[in-house]
Image (tube, rainbow, N blue to C red):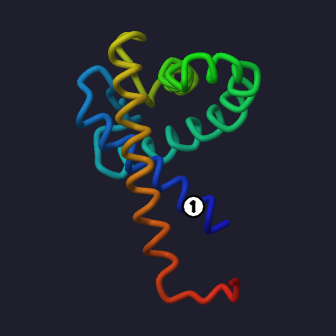
Amino acid sequence: MARFLVSLVTNAVALWLTTLIVTGVTLVPYADNDFARVVTLLFVALVFGIVNGIIGTAIRVVAFPLYILTLGLISLIVNAFLLELASWVTGWFGFGLKVDSFFWAAILGALVLAILSAIIGAILKAVFRVGRSSGRR
């Protein structure tokens, strides 16, 4: 459960920073206060995690030859598609993530999101491992 929560917070913070950096990716909260923004970010992070975990895994398995052929560059397109899909799903609720254009905003947003998620995830994993003894060698 702790791993899930760390992953959710990592995605939420990375999404928040992505909305600040990339102009075409915005967050539409359900109300105009800070609590609503945080809840909306956590909701979008949850939806993005589900979309990435289920649909993203299926796409990566099917597109494995394309990953090899393009030396992994197809992952930018796949991640942009998943970001756009998460935007579409959260749009059903009337609030959530909004991506302006598929090509530039989604691809740049997916690239920034991937970089930020990796950095924040590494930091949080290092912080939560400090002081723990797992007993493994």
Give the position of the N terminus as an image quadrant: bottom right
Above or below, 115 relative to 131: above
Secondary structure at numbered mark 1: helix
**In x, y percent, where is residue 72?**
54, 26
Q: Residues within 10 Å of mark 1 (few under 14, many from 20)?
A: few
Which residue is more in the foreground, 77 or 45?
Answer: 77
Q: Decide if residue 92 is in sight here.
A: no
Which residue is more in the foreground, 56 or 17?
Answer: 56
Quarter residue 52 falls in: top right
- Give the residue type that dot 1 points to: Leu
Above or below, 35 relative to 57: below
Pointer 1: what residue? 5
Q: Is residue 109 left or right of residue 73?
A: left
Q: Residue at x 61, y 17 (%)?
A: 69
Q: Decide if residue 56 is in sight here.
A: yes
Q: In this view, does 135 lie to the left or right of 31?
A: right
Give the position of the C terminus as an image quadrant: bottom right
Quarter residue 23 falls in: top left
Q: Which residue is drawn at 49% across and 67% down?
A: 125
Above or below, 110 relative to 115: above
Q: Residue at x 40, y 20 (%)?
A: 107
Q: In this view, does 30 lie to the left or right of 91?
A: left
**In x, y percent, where is residue 13?**
38, 50
Q: Residue at x 62, y 68 (%)?
A: 2
Which residue is more in the foreground, 13 or 128?
Answer: 128
**In x, y percent, where is residue 124?**
44, 66
**In x, y percent, where is residue 91?**
50, 21
